[in-house]
Amino acid sequence: MASPTPSHYERLGVGLDASLPELRAAFRVLSKRYHPDTTSLPSAEAEEAFRVLRQAYSVLSDPPSRAAYDLRLRQSAAPPLVIPSPARPPLVVPAPRPASVRRSLSGGEWFALLLLALAMAFSLLLGIGVAWARGAELVRQPSWWPEVTAAAPATVAEPAAPTA
């Protein structure tokens, strides 16, 4: 007699009342175990196990799909669901952080900011150096600026020289 197909809950190793963070934590743990790039299983077997795991998570993580799946489970004549054995340690799901808490920047993020600041300073110095080398004025007010037009000396037309 063939063994019954395990439910999505059994595949993820969670109970029927598992919350979304518990599902996500179980999926992360199992995906590290069965992902074809991180497992020692044969490639075809790892791909199939990971595909089944992704399918179970996608159904259970979507509330409408999960409700429809739960209804099918209750209506089917499948054997009762096996709850994960207590011998396996329970998954520890970290408490969600409040949205208003800001985390400190990591070392890599500080390094990226430092590189960005150095690139901006270098670009500014390069621009000023090129302008200076060309002999361009470094500070020049536009002609439409009010102080420039008001302070500009009035040009007086010189009388034309008499023609003989």
Image (tube, grey):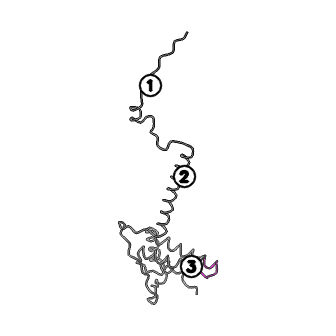
User: Separation of disc 3 and disc 2 at Cα?
Assistant: 52 Å
The single residue placed furthest to the bottom in the displayed view is: 87
**Quarter of the image that includes the N terminus:** bottom right
Dot in front, 1 or 2: 1
Q: Residue at x 43, y 77 (%)?
A: 22
Q: Where does the image place residue 88, in percent across and percent down from the top left?
A: 46, 87
Q: Earlier in the sequence, mark 3 or mark 2?
A: 3
**Quarter of the image that includes the C terminus:** top right
Tell me the tag on residue 34. 3
User: Separation of disc 3 and disc 1 at Cα?
Assistant: 85 Å
Q: Where does the image place residue 87, in percent across and percent down from the top left?
A: 45, 90
In the structure shown, which secondary structural element does the residue marked by tag 2 occupy? helix
The single residue placed furthest to the top in the displayed view is: 164
Q: Which residue is mark 2?
A: 126
Amino acid carrying mark 1 in the image: Thr
Amino acid carrying mark 2 in the image: Leu
Q: Where does the image place residue 162, in percent across and percent down from the top left?
A: 51, 12
Dot in front, 3 or 2: 2
State yes or no: residue 20 in magenta.
no
Q: Nearer the viewer, residue 38 or 4?
A: 38
Amino acid carrying mark 3 in the image: Tyr
> How many dots with numbers?
3
Tell me the tag on residue 155. 1
Q: Residue at x 49, y 66 (%)?
A: 111
Where are the magenta residues, as a range? 39-48
Dot in front, 3 or 1: 1
Q: Residue at x 64, y 81 (%)?
A: 42
Q: Residues within 10 Å of mark 2 (few under 14, many from 20)?
A: few
Q: Are marks 3 and 2 in contact (CB under 8 Å)?
A: no
